[in-house]
Image (cartoon, grey):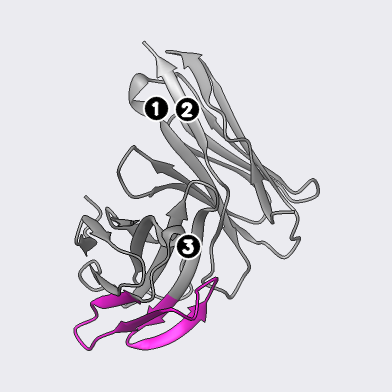
């Protein structure tokens, strides 16, 4: 079983929809949680990070962490065609540099 | 543009050969990370260097090695290449260590034939 599980999709939504992307994990030692966006043929770029449990909002993006359920989510409001990309969750333990990535969810926002 | 540069963009080589991938971190960043991305395994952490010293090791094969030079650029050496080594190789950098905020380069696509 992988430490981090992520539905690969693809996920297709109409423009303006609310998108929910999720990851589950098995290692309760993870403390830092990140979401990266990767456009085709590009490197991943950091969208958001959260430490421990709770919510964090940045514009149209909201990241949620539920450590009791070992479940993290990224919500995208008012989705745009430019949001079409692969979204990767990543996490790590406190003092380590090793990021564990999910396999990514391919999102397509249809105009 | 993240500020991290990688060369070459594409590399095609034969099994058994050796290649070197190069990475220049963002200006001022001391940490360099190497990742391998394949369709079946996703993005896998290979190794991290901080100011010239190895800091963390992930799923890096013994046939692979890396180093970080005094000017902070890094090289990933892949030897005795196998078909299964075909993948995207990303370099990332961060200011310190540990750091959640890693900035990724555009990657090197390696094809082993």
Task: Tell whether label 2 touches label 1 (CB within 8 Å).
Answer: yes
Viewer-side residue, A57 vs A105: A105
Quarter residue A66 falls in:
top right
Is residue A98 on the magenta stretch?
Answer: no
Task: Tell whether label 1 touches label 3 (CB within 8 Å).
Answer: no
Q: Residue at x 42, y 13 (%)?
A: A15
Mark 3–mark 2 distance (CA, rounded to whole Å) = 24 Å
Q: Which residue is mark 1?
A: A84
Is residue B73 on the magenta stretch?
Answer: yes
Q: Residue A67, image x and y in percent? A: 74, 51
Mark 3–mark 1 distance (CA, rounded to whole Å) = 24 Å
Tell me which segment is drawn in magenta: B48-77
Q: Residues within 10 Å of mark 2 (few under 14, many from 20)?
A: many
Viewer-side residue, B113 vs B57: B113
Viewer-side residue, B77 vs B95: B77
Q: Is residue B105 left or right of residue A105?
A: left
């Amino acid at each position: 079983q992988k430490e981090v599980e992520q539905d690969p999709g693809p996920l297709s939504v109409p423009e303006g929809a609310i998108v929910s992307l999720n990851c589950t994990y098995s290692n309760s030692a993870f403390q830092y949680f990140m979401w990266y966006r990767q456009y085709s043929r590009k490197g991943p770029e950091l969208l958001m990070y959260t430490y421990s449990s709770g919510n964090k909002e940045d514009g149209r993006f909201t990241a949620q962490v539920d450590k009791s359920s070992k479940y993290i989510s990224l919500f995208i409001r008012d989705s745009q065609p430019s949001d079409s990309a692969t979204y990767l969750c990543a996490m790590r333990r406190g003092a380590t540099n090793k990021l564990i990535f999910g396999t990514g969810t391919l999102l397509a926002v249809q105009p | 543009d993240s500020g991290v540069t990688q060369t070459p963009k594409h590399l095609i080589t034969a099994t058994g050969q050796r290649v070197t991938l190069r990475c220049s971190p963002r200006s001022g960043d001391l940490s360099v990370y190497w990742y391998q991305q394949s369709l079946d395994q996703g993005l896998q952490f290979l190794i991290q260097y901080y100011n010239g010293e190895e800091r963390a090791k992930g799923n890096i094969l013994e046939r692979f090695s890396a180093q970080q030079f005094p000017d902070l650029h890094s090289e990933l050496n892949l030897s005795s290449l196998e078909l299964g080594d075909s993948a995207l190789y990303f370099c990332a950098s961060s200011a310190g260590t540990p750091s959640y905020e890693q900035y990724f380069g555009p990657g090197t696509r390696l094809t082993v034939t």
